[in-house]
Image: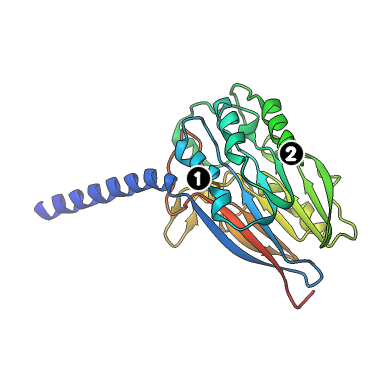
Amino acid sequence: MLQLMRLFRAATFAAAGAAAYAVAETQLHRIQEHDVPVRASAPALDVLHLADSHVRAADRRRLHFLETLAGRIPTVDLIVMTGDMIENDSGIDPLLKALEPLSARYGKAFVLGSHDYFQSEFKLPFKYLLGRQTEIRAPLADTQRMVHGLTAAGWIDMSNRSEILDTPLGRIRLTGVDDPYLKRHRTEHIARGSEVLAIGLTHSPDVVAPYILNGFDLVVAGHTHGGQLRAPFKGALVTNSTLPTALAAGVHRIGNAALHVSPGLGTSEHMRVRFLCRPEVTLLHLRPTSKE
C-alpha cells in the first residue's frame, strides 16, 4: 500500500509539473530557421513566415515579441502571414501597431483564417482533441477594419488571387487562397507561368495539392499549431485538418515542392497550453540546389 501511495504521489507531481509547463510554454516565443532546398534555377530568397498569432489586447508578451522582432532578424526578402492573426477585435489595433516595424525587400503578403472572420467564443477544451470541427457559431470579427489596416500598411491581401512581384531576382509569383477551413477558398487561379519562383499561401494546409500539381516551389500554411500538444516519440496528437499528423509542423518535401507548416505564435484563448511545441515565427532560407 505504501509503495502504491508513493507511485500515486509521484504521478500526481509529474502531471502537475507537465500541466504547469504546458501553460508556461505558450510564452516561450522563438525565432526558428530552416534551410529550404529549391530547384537550381530558382533564386536564393529569405522568407519570414508568421502564422496564428491569435492576438488579443491582453497578450502583452506576444505583442512585445512581434514589436521587437524586426530588431532581432536580418532584413528579409519577403514576409508572409497565413491567418488567424487575431483572437477577437481587441487584437486588431495592437496587431497593426506591432507589425509596423517589419519590412521586406520585395513585399509583405497575407491570407486570412477563421479567427480573422469570427471572434473566439468559449468551447470545452477537450473538443480540440476530438479533431476537425467545422461548424462555427461565434460573433463576427471586424475583418474589414483589419484588412484595411494591413493593406494601408503595405501588406498585400492574397485571398483567392495571385500577384506577380517584379524583383532584381526575376518575377516571383505569390498566390493565395481564402480560408479552406471555412470553405471560402477557390483554386482555379492556382497556376504558374515562367516566373523564377512561385509561392503559395493558405491558412489550412488542406489545399496543398493544387499548388504542388501546378509546380509551385514553396507552400506556406498555419492552422495546425503544430498539433499544439505533442507526445514524445509520437508527435502531434491532432492537426484539426486533413493533414497527416506527421506533417503538422516544419518543412516537408512533397514532390518537387516544399511545404512549411508553422507551429504558430499563439493559441486560442480557451486552449492556452502547448506541450513540446513552442510558439514561433520562422525564417525560411530558400536555397537553390544543384539538381532540377
Q: Quadrant of residue 217?
A: bottom right
Residue at the image point whose x is 28% and y is 45% from the top: 16
Task: Reply above or below: 38 against 52.
Answer: below
Task: Reply above or below: 157 against 107.
Answer: above
Residue, disc 1: 65
Mark 1: which secondary structure?
helix
Horizontally, residue 224 falls left or right of residue 215, namely left
Residue at the image point whose x is 14% and y is 49% from the top: 5
Percent x, y of residue 225 = 54, 47
Res 271 visible: no
Q: Quadrant of residue 241?
A: top right
Percent x, y of residue 226 = 54, 51
Q: Nearer the viewer, mark 1 or mark 2?
A: 1
Q: Between residues 105 and 92, which one lies in front from this camera angle?
A: 105
Q: Find residue 178 and name its label.
A: 2
Nearest to N terminus: mark 1 or mark 2: 1
Percent x, y of residue 58 = 46, 31
Res 198 visible: yes
Task: Reply above or below: 236 against 117.
Answer: below
Horizontally, residue 40 falls left or right of residue 228, namely right
Horizontally, residue 105 falls left or right of residue 266, namely right
Q: What's the residue type where badge 2 is placed?
A: Asp
Horizontally, residue 135 falls left or right of residue 290, namely left
